[in-house]
């Protein structure tokens, strides 16, 4: 590394205001590369997110600064989740400002995050790359990482939405009202329903994972509340639309969206899922249509709805395609053995 550049650990929960501001500027430059249509993340939102990282998540970060230590030109981090499942894997991220690429900075940061993962007894690193930053894919290919699954961020323009289709889906859903009840939670999940929510989260284990070496994950009430705390601390507002079978009181499925007033034109469609025994009844479309109806009525400033889908998730893609979602950004989730990374680092010294 040139003498004019310096690398230091970054304390994500207890940095100075100047350090947070430098990281926020760095992140927003990279954000503009990936999401050129979106506004930057406000400094306070980023700080609140970092101050409310759940206790079961350990984030270690290193930053490379310019000589005056006024700007972060590269950063690398590793996210170590201490939960019963998936103790063999960890997520890493490395970003370098465009003007400072091809100088070996990513390799230096890779060595630090890999060592942190190794010390925590992890075996496998997960990394995400984006089509709008093709250098990431090239770097991971040189590293010897393997593609785990291909995915897209898909976007729906509400201006182009066929509202008559939404009305038809609502009508079909209402025909099921004798058997099922559709309702909504706004904000935190009600305490009296927390166990049902935990069961709804189990639907996440049915999402296609491609070749990623992931175990099923199981949420707990404590971890769920901590995750909520971070979400709401950043200013997000959440709507959860769910369906209950009247005869049994069992939850049949749900859909969830989050919206942040700092980015008023974009709403994020999160998980949608229906339990296998209730599928092919039209419940998924009913849930989607009910949520879109609420968005149109109560969030008139929203122009776009975005969601992430694995390219192999054909059931959800079928519904989204019918609604008019279109590919917005492609991404790939990679995995690489730590031993392979260590070999690469030794070969490129």
Image (cartoon, rainbow, N blue to C red):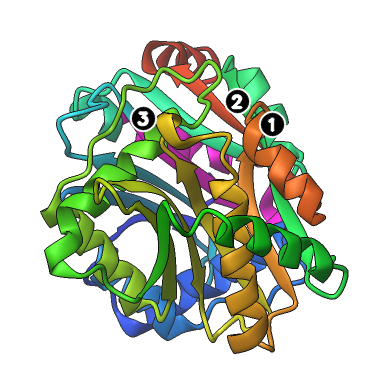
- 251 lies left or right of 311: left
Residue that sits furthest to the right in the current view: 160
Location of mark 3 (residue): 114
The mark nearer the N terminus, 1 or 3, is: 3
**Residue located 88% across and 69% down the image:** 160
- Name the foreground residue: 344 vs 247: 247
**Residue located 47% across and 69% down the image:** 23
- Mark nearest the camera among 1 and 3 is 1
**Residue located 46% across and 41% down the image:** 274
Q: Which mark is residue 311?
A: 1
**Which element carries disc 2, helix, strand or loop?**
strand
Q: Is residue 69 above or below residue 195?
A: below
Decide if residue 126 is in sight here. yes
Q: Residues within 10 Å of mark 3 (few under 14, many from 20)?
A: many
| Circles 2, 1 touching at the beta carbon (< 8 Å) | yes
* Residue 109 painted magenta: yes
- Name the foreground residue: 139 vs 271: 271
Location of mark 2 (residue): 149
The mark nearer the N terminus, 2 or 1, is: 2
- Mark nearest the camera among 3 and 2 is 2
**Which element carries disc 1, helix, strand or loop?**
loop
Q: Is residue 47 above or below residue 311?
A: below
């Amino acid at each position: 590394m040139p003498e004019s550049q310096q690398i230091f650990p970054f304390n994500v929960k207890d940095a100075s205001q100047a350090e947070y501001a430098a990281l926020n500027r760095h992140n927003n430059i990279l954000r503009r590369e990936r999401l050129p249509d979106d506004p930057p993340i406000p400094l306070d939102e980023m700080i609140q997110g970092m101050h409310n990282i759940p206790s079961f998540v350990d984030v270690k970060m290193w930053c490379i600064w310019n000589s005056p230590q006024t700007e972060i030109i590269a950063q690398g981090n590793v996210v170590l989740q201490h939960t019963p499942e998936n103790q063999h894997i960890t997520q890493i991220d490395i970003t370098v400002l465009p003007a400072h690429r091809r100088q070996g900075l990513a390799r230096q940061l890779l060595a630090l995050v890999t060592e942190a993962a190794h010390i925590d007894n992890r075996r496998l690193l997960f990394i995400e790359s984006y089509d709008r930053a093709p250098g990431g894919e090239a770097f991971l290919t040189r590293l010897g990482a393997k593609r785990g699954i291909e995915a897209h961020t898909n976007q729906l323009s509400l201006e182009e939405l066929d509202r008559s289709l939404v009305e038809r889906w609502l009508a079909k859903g209402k025909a099921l009202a004798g058997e099922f009840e559709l309702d909504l939670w706004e904000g935190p999940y009600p305490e009296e329903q927390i166990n049902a929510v935990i069961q709804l989260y189990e639907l996440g284990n049915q999402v296609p994972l491609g070749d990623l070496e992931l175990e099923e994950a199981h949420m707990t009430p404590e971890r769920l509340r901590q995750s909520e705390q971070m979400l709401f601390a950043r200013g997000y507002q959440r709507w959860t639309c769910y369906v209950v079978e009247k005869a049994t009181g069992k939850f049949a499925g749900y859909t969830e969206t989050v919206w942040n007033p700092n980015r008023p034109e974009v709403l994020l469609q999160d998980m949608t899922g229906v339990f296998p025994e209730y599928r092919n009844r039209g419940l998924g479309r009913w849930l989607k249509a009910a949520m879109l109806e609420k968005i149109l009525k109560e969030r008139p400033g929203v122009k776009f709805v975005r969601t992430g889908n694995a390219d192999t998730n054909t059931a959800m893609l079928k519904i989204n395609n019918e609604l008019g979602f279109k590919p917005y950004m492609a991404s790939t989730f990679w995995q690489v053995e730590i031993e392979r990374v260590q070999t690469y680092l030794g070969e490129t010294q």
